[in-house]
Image (cartoon, rainbow, N blue to C red):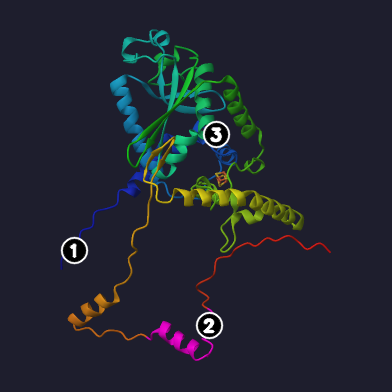
Amino acid sequence: MRIRYRPVSLWPAAHAADARRPRSQQTKLGASDTVCARRAGYLLHGRTPTDTGEKRKAILGTWLHTGILDAAREEYGWLVERRVEDETVRGHIDAVQLDSTTAARLPKRLRPTLPAEETTVEDVKSKSTYQWDSVVRYGASEAELRQVYLYADLLGTEGFASVRGQRQLARLGPVPVARIRFRFMNRDNGDDHIQEIAYEADRARRARWWVQQVRAAASPEELPRTFQGPGISVICDHCPFRTACWGPLVAGRSPQSQLIHDDEERAKALAEYAEVSEQIKPLKDRQKLLRAKLDGSEPGVYGDNVLKWSGGNPTKVDDVGAMVSLYRRAGLAVPMAPDAAAMKATLEGAGIPVPTRLDHDRRTAVSINVTARKKP
Ligand code: SF4
């Protein structure tokens, strides 16, 4: 008998290698762990992750990241993946481009091919096409800004960490940062988008204050959930502390339902729901009108926006006639199922109610209906 050979999947190996990376094992708060206050609390208190989640996209991002930074180091002499830390927080800066005055203080082999106009801390972020429009329109998120401000502040106050492989850099002492740069890479098509901002001391202070609040909490549960929970936030959907934070998922109940404890809170949430619905309605109507006005417009660039159309293609349906022919050619019996639509039409035509039964495996969608209470 011939044994069918199946190539192994590389994903188990990729997950194992990723779990061994220093960042995956660190229990001290890293700048890249400052996405959510509650999650940072779990890490700081050494809690064991409760969920594994899907990591393939993150692993692809890490690989892309490594490749790009290696190229920047080899071709431009940038300082990449350099460690910065103090007693409360640490991290690895993706890339530092020193200005010519600071670069001149380093041995020749560590100087960049092209020094920056002003010392710049760069962070590379890989994104999907799905996130791209929001990246180009709005730039880095609050959490991404916080992370990079922490790196820049550590570099400006402590300098490069004095660890193996960067002792010469550490001898520079504190390196004030003048500019922050985000380099967004689209991992689906290779597009890149750059956002540069001048370093603001006030923003750096806010980032440090955020870390202090997390460190001051006696338990992670004291800290606010920065995101709105599984099913609403993709960050929560993939969070390794999802169950610790929101409890086990209960079928038919949103995890957020536990945020309401009594009728008073229910009344408050209902009032806000009604108010938000009222505010959204004119916007939705306006959007419908604008969509209708744009109908038939050619795709293209108009002002600051790009118009594209998708969909509108014929949908595929089962070709029963072709299937019957195939069956007949193969000498198979064509199944003769009752024609429910024709039977229904006959019964309705004769004025006889169509019998129905409840299918407990298929449920209608649960929709909320909020109306104003009648005043007595
Ligand atoms: S589940 Fe969401 S809110 Fe909770 S810790 Fe994780 S990211 Fe934060």
Q: Is residue 262 left or right of residue 216?
A: right
Quadrant containing the C terminus is bottom right
* In the image, the residue with mark 2 has its CB under 8 Å from the nearest atom of ligand 1: no
The three-letter code of the residue at mark 1 reads: Ile
Q: CA distance from mark 1 to mark 3?
A: 54 Å
**Image spot of residue 303 (x, y percent):** 43, 35
Q: Residues within 10 Å of mark 1 (few under 14, many from 20)?
A: few
Q: CA distance from mark 1 to mark 2?
A: 49 Å
Q: Residue 287 or 320: which is nearer the viewer? A: 287
What type is the residue that disc 2 sits on? Arg
Q: Is mark 3 within 8 Å of ligand 1?
A: no
- Position of residue 117 relative to residue 204, above or below, is above
Measured along the vertical axis of the image, is residue 335 above or below residue 270? Answer: below
Residues at marks 1 and 3 touching, judged by CB atoms closer than 8 Å: no
Question: How far from the left and from the top, in percent, is residue 84?
Answer: 48, 23
Q: Which residues are magenta?
A: 338-358
Position above or below: 240 against 370: above
Q: Is residue 229 visible?
A: no
Quadrant containing ligand 1: top right
Sequence-wise, the earlier of marks 2 and 3 is 3
Whether pointer 1 and pointer 2 mark residues with C-beta atoms closer than 8 Å, the reply is: no
Determine crowd level at label 3: few under 14, some 14-19, many 20+ residues with C-alpha closer than 10 A: few
Find numbered disc 2 in the image and state the secondary structure of the residue it sits on: loop
Q: Which residue is mark 1?
A: 3
Q: Mark on residue 357? A: 2
Q: Which residue is mark 3?
A: 142
Q: Nearer the viewer, residue 226 or 370?
A: 370
